[in-house]
Image (cartoon, helix red, strand yellow):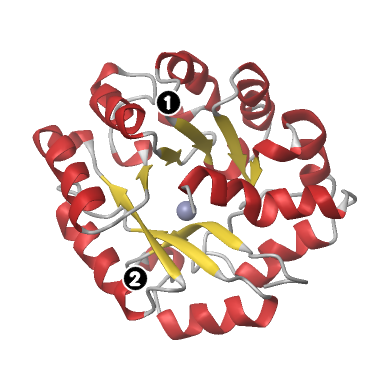
């Protein structure tokens, strides 16, 4: 909580990612969240193509501190027969509130029809879907322009806001063209001024704070928003109000 505002982190990982020395110690994560006033963090596990293995790990992680963590469902077209049943289980039985996809762990671009059943599910349920985006050929933000208009009841969150150029500009353009497209802020590619540009060009109502915890430290990821040259009203939207609207909290 910062000055009466609820702060929500839209991007957090469950599981181990050894090449990045990442591990999901809930108490360490909570310590960092508490140090800077982050109330809740959205968590997902991208390491198991069946979906269920990782989603069960996410459910176990979230249940330890259910008032602080929110689960997101993960599915993969590598095991496409499980996608819709697993989404139903994760949303209806595990109580997850949104969907995460990670195209670099597949061979299909974001706009490939192989993802359509996931997008349709999000559209049917009015869910938010966050995808990794960046320089990887499977997940350029420009592809979001091919899907956002086809699923108007879903909301598409462009993780990392494309990371570096030209993908950052693609992310902004997608948000400008489609009212159900959002850009999310976590990144290792962030020179000063990027948050200000995202707010000015995509709109403060379309920028969502995320940290990538525990891959990145939420204290530093939050700092660039808190200290950005944007208004308090804009910070309030970015830090929590937009996420609350997306998650129907
Ligand atoms: Zn991430």
Label ID, residue 94: none
The residue under the point 31% across, 41% down is 105
Assess disc 1: are there few (<14), some (14-19) or many (≥20) residues with their C-alpha within 10 Å of its C-alpha.
some
Left or right: where 201 falls relative to 181: right
Instruction: Respond yes or no on whether mark 1 lies under 8 Å from ligand 1.
Output: no
Task: Measuring from the top left, give residue 230's x and y in whole percent.
Answer: 87, 48
Read off the residue under disc 2: 62
Read off the residue under disc 1: 153
Q: Nearer the viewer, residue 178 or 14?
A: 178
Helix or strand or loop: what does disc 2 sit on? helix
Q: Is residue 34 above or below residue 151?
A: below
Judged from this view, the residue extending furthest toward the left is 81
Q: Is residue 214 above or below residue 208?
A: below
Task: Measuring from the top left, give residue 142's x and y in whole percent.
Answer: 54, 20
Helix or strand or loop: what does disc 1 sit on? loop
Q: CA distance from mark 2 to mark 1?
A: 27 Å
Left or right: where 95 falls relative to 234: left
The residue under the point 90% across, 51% down is 229
Task: Measuring from the top left, give residue 97's x and y in whole percent.
Answer: 37, 51
The residue under the point 29% across, 64% down is 58
């Amino acid at each position: 909580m910062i000055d009466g505002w609820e702060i929500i982190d839209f991007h957090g990982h469950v599981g181990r990612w050894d090449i990045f020395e990442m591990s999901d110690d809930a108490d360490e994560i909570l310590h960092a969240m508490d140090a800077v006033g982050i109330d809740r963090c959205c968590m997902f596990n991208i390491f198991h193509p069946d979906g269920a293995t990782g989603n069960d790990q996410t459910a176990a992680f979230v249940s330890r501190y259910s008032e602080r963590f929110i689960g997101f469902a993960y599915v993969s077209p590598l095991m496409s027969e499980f996608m819709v049943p697993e989404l139903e289980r994760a949303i209806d039985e595990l109580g997850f509130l949104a969907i995460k996809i990670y195209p670099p762990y597949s061979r299909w671009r974001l706009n490939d029809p192989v993802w359509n059943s996931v997008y349709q599910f999000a559209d049917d349920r009015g869910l938010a879907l966050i995808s990794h985006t960046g320089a990887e050929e499977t997940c350029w933000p420009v592809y979001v322009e091919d899907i956002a208009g086809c699923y108007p009841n879903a909301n598409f969150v462009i993780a990392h806001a494309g990371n570096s150029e030209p993908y950052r500009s693609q992310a902004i353009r997608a948000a400008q063209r489609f009212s159900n497209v959002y850009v999310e802020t976590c990144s290792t590619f962030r020179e000063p001024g990027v948050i200000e540009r995202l707010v000015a060009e995509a709109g403060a109502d379309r920028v969502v704070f995320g940290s990538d915890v525990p891959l990145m430290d939420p204290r530093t990821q939050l700092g660039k928003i808190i200290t950005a040259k944007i208004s308090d009203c804009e910070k309030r939207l970015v830090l929590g109000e937009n996420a609350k609207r997306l998650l129907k909290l």
